[in-house]
Amino acid sequence: MTSEKKSKVFPLPVNEARGEVPLWIGNIPIVLAAEMERLAGLSSRLQCRSLNELFQRLTSVELSATLAGVELLAVRGDVKGALSKLSLKHFADCGVAFSAVLAHHFDGDEGNEEAVEEKMAADKTE
């Protein structure tokens, strides 16, 4: 990640309590989340036989897995724009983001229900 992006404020909301992860693709910000329905769709598209295979394909920056991961795991941002800007130089950042978003399911934490409820209540008032 370039120092310019490190110093640039991420403009989209990211709910870390539910495992969301920010990702810049070029100058386009998107937010990824490993929701079960999204993971199932991604696994089906890539014809993975296990979650371990899915994890390996995403984090080893396989071309088709990276494209599908950006498309199917994005919950916020200009996904079409990000995909149009995606090039091989972005794959390392994508791999890091995929690893972080999947780690949310493997950390042994039961989740922060209070933070999720607060976020949901705040979203309803907006």
Image: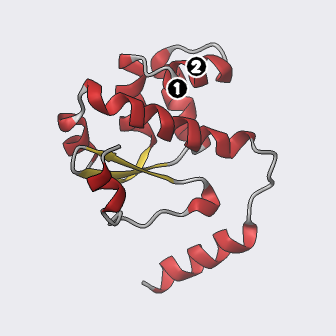
Residue 10, given in percent of the width and then of the height, sits at 35, 63
Which quadrant holds the N terminus?
A: top left
Q: Position of residue 114 (x, y in %)?
A: 73, 74
User: What is the quadrant of residue 111 in the picture?
Assistant: bottom right
Labelled pair 1, 2 in contact (Cβ < 8 Å): yes
Position of residue 117 relative to residue 17, above or below, is below
Callout 2: few (<14), some (14-19), or many (20+) C-alpha neighbours within 10 Å?
Answer: some
Type of amino acid under label 1: Thr
Three-letter amino acid code of the residue under disc 2: Gln
Label annotation for residue 59: 1
Can you name the residue that lies furthest to the front here? Answer: 3
Residue 49 figure quarter: top right
Number of marks: 2
According to the image, label 2 marks what residue? 56
Element type at mark 2: helix
Which residue is painted at 27% across and 24% down in the image? Answer: 88
Q: Quadrant of the C terminus?
A: bottom left
Name the residue at 56% across, 34% down.
Answer: 39
Q: CA distance from mark 1 to mark 2?
A: 5 Å
Q: Position of residue 63 (x, y in %)?
A: 36, 18
Q: Is residue 98 left or right of residue 65?
A: right
